[in-house]
Amino acid sequence: MATRIRIHTDSTGWIDAEISEEKNPVTAGQIIDVLPIESKTRTWGDEVYFEIPVQTTEENSQVMVEVGDLAYWPAGNCFCIFFGQTPASTDAQPAAASAVNVFGKITGDPEAFKQVRSGEKITVKKA
């Protein structure tokens, strides 16, 4: 089952995405339960991340992710949006700083997040 969401910053406007409970049901469920979320962005290469009111442990976690993946970073209690190379990448594939729980995917254009700067307000809500 997928939950459709929308993500907004002033730089991107509204971007469509989905949260899937298939791979990481505990993580996905906790994130769905706290929607809507408002936070301030941080960037790390081609990744936007921000703190959210969720605290959970690693669940089928991984370091290598795909462009457009949405993930939860347990080490920082953060929602992560991957859209390209990060400082941890060894090639074009995004790599997280440490293990993350992938829980969803951008269904719109992940490249739009290249415009986001640290400190921007970000909103995540159910579609």
Image: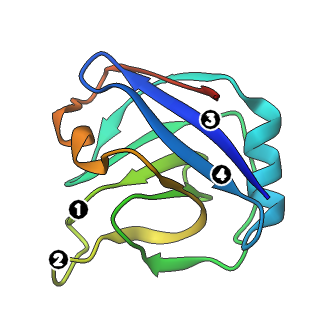
Q: Kindly identify the residue that appears in the image at 26 percent across and 30 percent down.
A: 118
Query: Toward which corner of the image does residue 82 lie, by quadrant?
Result: bottom left
Residue 84 numbered tag: 1
Amino acid type, mark 4: Ile
Element on which disc 2 rests: loop
| Rendered location of residue 49, percent (x, y) | 42, 43
Residue 52 numbered tag: 3
Q: Kindly identify the residue that appears in the image at 52 percent across and 45 percent down.
A: 17
Residue 47 numbered tag: none
User: Which color mode does the image show?
Assistant: rainbow
Residues packed near mark 4 inside 10 Å, few (<14), some (14 to 19) or many (20 plus): many
Query: Toward which corner of the image does residue 108 lie, by quadrant?
Result: top left
Element on which disc 4 rests: strand
Element on which disc 3 rests: loop
Mark earlier in primary sequence (3, 4) = 4
| Rendered location of residue 26, percent (x, y) | 83, 60
Q: Quadrant of the N terminus?
A: bottom right
Closest to the observer: 80 or 109? 109
Amino acid type, mark 2: Ala
Q: Quadrant of the C terminus?
A: top right
- The residue that label 4 is drawn on is 19
- The residue that label 2 is drawn on is 92
Per the model, the C-alpha gap separating discs 1 and 3 is 22 Å
Q: Kindly identify the residue that appears in the image at 31 percent across and 22 percent down.
A: 119
Per the model, the C-alpha gap separating discs 3 and 4 is 15 Å
Give the answer, above or below, for where 100 lies relative to 72.
below
| Rendered location of residue 21, percent (x, y) | 77, 61
Element on which disc 1 rests: loop
In the figure, is residue 15 to the left or right of 77? Answer: left
- Pointers 2 and 1 in contact (C-beta within 8 Å): yes
Per the model, the C-alpha gap separating discs 1 and 4 is 20 Å
In the figure, is residue 119 to the left or right of 115? Answer: right
